[in-house]
Image (tube, helix red, strand yellow):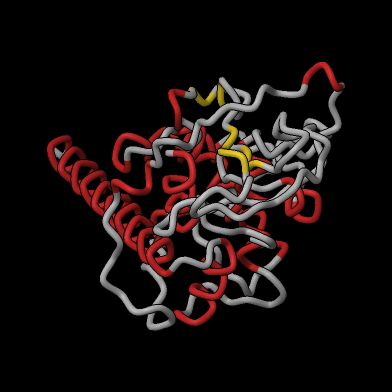
Amino acid sequence: MLGRLLVIVVVLALGAGGVWLVARAAVPSAGPTTTDIPALRLEPADVEPGSAAPVRGEETGPGDDAGTETGSGTLAEWAEALSPAVGVPARALTAYGNAELVLREQAPGCGLSWATLAGIGRVESDHGRHGGAELGADGRPSPPIIGVALDGAPGVQAIPDTDDGVLDGDREYDRAVGPMQFIPSTWRVQGVDASGDGRADPQQIDDAALSAGRYLCGPGRDLTGGQGWWEGVLSYNQSVDYGRTVYGLAEQYADLAGTAAAEAAEDSKNSKDSEAP
């Protein structure tokens, strides 16, 4: 993201920052939740940057009637049905699907896929579960996900505090926060309220997913082609291995969703055949 830099030379992205209008008493305690990085256990895909975009899996994405900015209704049903097949929490899928639907309307030329957001969410925070966190029904991880201090240690860029510790609990250095790991300065520019609660909160996964989608789409970017997809993902994190890891995950999620849809269609056909006179 803007000012986004690697914490570990391989894959950990550090998002950027925002505006969380809460009282000082609600400032989270800083904690090194990113000392064990989920992405390091994932294999990057064997693909050259710019050569291709992941399979979109449009036939398995959320339907046009599923989305609202609060992620309710048939969107939640879609997420609940898909979750066991792809291994992503339904609450996180709801956020990724909602972001795709909103951006179909707001940026129709972008072609953002829920699977790409799921790939990023897996790398950044294991879909809001990193460090033992649990993603609640309200879309917020408990405890909040707060990354290492960007203090200039080996492999880490020094980014002095930009938010007075409001988002990350650190008044000396910035830290990446939330399920999509934004740093405060980028959240201030990109953060939006997708949950409808009246505030843009990087810890809230609906807000974080839609904000990440808007960032990836950028000014007129087309994510359906190799060049645009790689430009978007490498703007989120400049590591090629990061991009390859997200690519592999996005393809895997789309493939798993497609297999589940085909099996469900076959089961439905067999059921109808058995009921026929």
> In the visual, does 170 lie left or right of 221?
right
The image shows a total of numbered marks equal to 0
Q: Quadrant of the N terminus?
A: bottom right
Residue 224 position in % (x across, y down): 49, 74
Q: Quadrant of residue 61?
A: bottom left
Q: Is residue 66 visible?
A: no
Q: Quadrant of the C terminus?
A: top left
> In the visual, does 169 lie left or right of 24?
left
Residue extending farthest top: 25
Q: Would you place residue 15 above or below residue 72 in this image?
A: below
Q: Residue at x 59, y 68 (%)?
A: 235
Residue 16 position in % (x across, y down): 68, 51
Q: Would you place residue 112 above or below residue 25 in this image?
A: below
Q: Residue at x 19, y 42 (%)?
A: 267
In the image shown, does 272 or 30 lie closer to the viewer?
30
Q: Quadrant of residue 139?
A: top right
Q: Residue at x 69, y 77 (%)?
A: 220
Residue extending farthest front: 153
> In the visual, does 79 lie left or right of 138?
left
Residue 127 position in % (x across, y down): 47, 38
Q: Residue at x 80, y 46 (%)?
A: 162
In the image shown, does 235 or 116 lie closer to the viewer?
235
